[in-house]
Image (cartoon, helix red, strand yellow):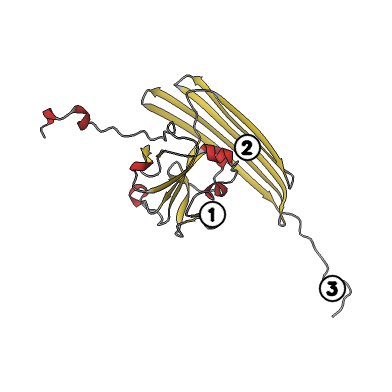
């Protein structure tokens, strides 16, 4: 077809943004994902099986451990990290592999891609990919949330999530904090503490351009209990 007879809309291809659009999500039901194609794409258009753990589901279940959140995903074995019985890459943050433990306090949603996705990720595992999407500062409105929890084993947990708009639709910052302490969790552990900080700033200089700065510090600590020494032969018998 000659170029001059084509509809201008048919000649223009616009790529989706590189951020997840959750505006059409309804509760636990997610319509878009970024893990299947590295672009914000409707899940129905991606030729892969994708499960999304939405922020609403994580909040309603009060999920505090990354592995506990994944237990609600079909075909995923939280005990060995396998998907469909095959090895999977589980430590991905914003589509990039990381070392260390992921903290749900700084995670907005979790996307599980089932099956091989070499076309999108290069070297990958046959089971699939688990990709955690970080919380980002929101430019539309302020929000503040704080919660505290106490439980058995002298457990105490406090969390803070504060989003502040500095310039409407232009500049915003967000702070996530967590402190947790547990005593006598296991026989070989006397005390366990967790300190987490995440600070993000989003700046939109132009309507279709945004910059995000993210700083994170995670310090889980565990101290061992003293060894109990017992005398196995107090009478000195042979």
Query: Which comes sooner in the sequence, label 3 or label 1?
Result: 1
Real-space CA distance between mark 2 and mark 3, rounded to the nearest whole angstrom: 48 Å
186 to 27, vertically: above or below: below
- Residue behind mark 2: 178
Query: Marks 3 and 1: which is nearer the front?
Result: 1
The structure residue drawn at horizontal position 45% and vertical position 35%, both measured from the top left corner, is 25
Using the rendered view, name the quadrant where residue 46 is placed: top left
Tell which tag, 2 or 3, sits nearer the viewer.
2
Looking at the image, residue 184 lies above or below residue 23: below
Residue located beneath label 3 in the image? 233
Q: Residues within 10 Å of mark 2 (few under 14, many from 20)?
A: many
From the image, which quarter does the N terminus lie in? top left
Residue, far left: 2
For the point 33% across and 47% down, the residue is: 47
Query: Disc 1 designates what residue?
Result: 78
Q: Position of residue 216 (x, y in %)?
A: 54, 37
| Alpha carbons under labels 3 and 1: distance apart | 44 Å
Which tag, 1 or 2, sits closer to the chain's start? 1
Q: Decide if residue 202 is on the left or right side of residue 195.
A: left
Of residues 165 and 230, the one drawn nearer to the viewer in this rendering: 165
- Left or right: residue 42 compared with residue 220: left
Q: Residue at x 54, y 45 (%)?
A: 102
């Amino acid at each position: 077809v000659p170029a001059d007879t084509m509809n201008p809309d048919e000649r223009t291809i616009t790529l989706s943004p590189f951020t997840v659009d959750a505006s059409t999500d309804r509760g636990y039901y997610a319509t878009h994902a970024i893990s299947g194609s590295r672009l914000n794409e409707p899940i129905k258009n991606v030729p892969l099986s994708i499960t999304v753990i939405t922020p609403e589901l994580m909040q309603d279940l009060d999920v505090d451990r990354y592995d506990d959140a994944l237990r609600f995903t079909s075909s995923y074995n939280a005990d060995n990290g396998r998907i469909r019985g095959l090895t999977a890459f589980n430590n991905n943050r914003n589509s990039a592999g990381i070392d260390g433990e992921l903290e749900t306090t700084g995670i907005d949603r979790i996307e599980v891609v089932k099956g091989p996705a070499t076309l999108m990720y290069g070297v990958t595992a046959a089971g699939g990919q688990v990709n955690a999407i970080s919380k980002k500062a929101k430019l539309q409105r302020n929000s503040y949330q704080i919660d505290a929890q106490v439980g058995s084993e002298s457990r105490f947990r406090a969390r803070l999530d504060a989003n502040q708009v500095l310039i409407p639709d232009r500049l915003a910052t967000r702070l996530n904090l967590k402190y947790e302490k547990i005593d006598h969790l296991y026989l070989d552990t006397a005390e366990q503490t967790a300190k987490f900080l995440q600070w993000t700033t989003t700046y939109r200089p132009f309507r279709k351009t945004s910059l995000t700065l993210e700083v994170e510090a995670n310090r889980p600590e565990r101290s061992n209990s003293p060894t109990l020494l017992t005398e196995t032969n107090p009478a000195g018998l042979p």
